[in-house]
Image (tube, rainbow, N blue to C red):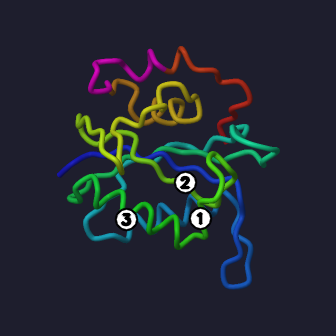
């Protein structure tokens, strides 16, 4: 069984069955969807963090978290599952780094290094982003990237400006 760290983010609400689902509810629904998959176990979940948006135009703040999954799915099949969950929750890919109902990223998959057209592991910019590193450090402070870099040390180099643990 593989261990995969997944980054979760949302800064848009969505209408579901006539009811509005806010960003935090979007993340909770994604965790429920992952937990409901027979080849995935959600082992750990960080706190939620409110984070200023990075990207074009004015956007609402994000809610971010990191989950540790134990999974039997190979990386590309896990990516397919994550994208399916994003689509079910109203994700529209129209503007790069634009606002979104849900963003699910594979940050790490065991100690695998992969660079293919569809998937790059470890996530290429995770070490630069406090909104990824803070929740990752919360659930795995002693974790090292395949390069040997320690998560806690990488977090020390990230800006935490505007990032609030909820």
Look at the image and say whether residue 41 sits in the magenta stretch.
no
Give percent across and percent down for residue 21.
Answer: 69, 69
User: Of marks 2 and 3, which one's residue comes earlier in the chain?
Assistant: 3
User: Of marks 3 and 1, which one's residue comes earlier in the chain?
Assistant: 3
Q: Is residue 130 left or right of residue 124?
A: right
- Residue pushed farthest left? 1
Mark number for residue 81?
Answer: 3
Per the picture, the main secondary structure of the magenta-coloured stretch is loop
Secondary structure under badge 2? strand
Residue ID at (69%, 41%):
50
Local packing at callout 3 (Cα closer than 10 Å; few below 14, some 14-19, many 20+) is some
Look at the image and say whether residue 152 sits in the magenta stretch.
yes
Give percent across and percent down for residue 56.
Answer: 74, 42
Give percent across and percent down for residue 64.
Answer: 59, 45
Q: Are marks 2 and 1 in contact (CB under 8 Å)?
A: yes
Name the one closer to the observer, 55 or 143. Answer: 55
- Residue pushed farthest bottom? 17
Local packing at callout 1 (Cα closer than 10 Å; few below 14, some 14-19, many 20+) is some
Local packing at callout 2 (Cα closer than 10 Å; few below 14, some 14-19, many 20+) is many
Q: Is residue 63 left or right of residue 70?
A: right
Mark number for residue 91?
Answer: 1
Q: Is residue 6 above or below residue 124?
A: below
> How far is mark 2 from mark 3, CA to CA?
12 Å
Secondary structure under badge 1? loop
Residue ID at (17%, 52%):
1
Q: Which residues are magenta?
A: 144-154
Residue ID at (63%, 21%):
159
Q: Which residue is mark 2?
A: 103
Find residue 77 and report its image quarter: bottom left
> How far is mark 3 from mark 1, CA to CA?
14 Å
Secondary structure under badge 3? helix
């Amino acid at each position: 069984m593989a261990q995969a760290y997944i980054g979760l983010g949302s800064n848009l609400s969505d209408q579901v069955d006539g009811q509005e689902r806010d960003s935090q509810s979007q993340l909770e629904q994604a965790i429920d969807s992952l937990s409901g998959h027979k080849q995935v176990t959600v082992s750990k979940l960080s706190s939620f963090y409110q984070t200023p948006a990075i990207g074009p135009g004015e956007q609402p703040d994000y809610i971010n978290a990191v989950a540790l999954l134990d999974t039997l799915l190979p990386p590309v099949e896990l990516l397919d599952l994550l994208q399916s969950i994003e689509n079910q929750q109203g994700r529209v890919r129209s503007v790069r780094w634009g606002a979104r109902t849900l963003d699910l990223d594979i940050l790490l998959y065991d100690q695998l290094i992969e660079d293919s057209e569809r998937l790059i592991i470890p996530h290429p910019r995770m070490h630069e982003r406090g909104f990824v590193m803070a929740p990752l450090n919360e659930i795995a402070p002693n974790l090292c990237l395949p390069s040997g870099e320690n998560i806690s040390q990488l977090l020390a180099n990230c800006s935490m400006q505007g990032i609030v643990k909820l």
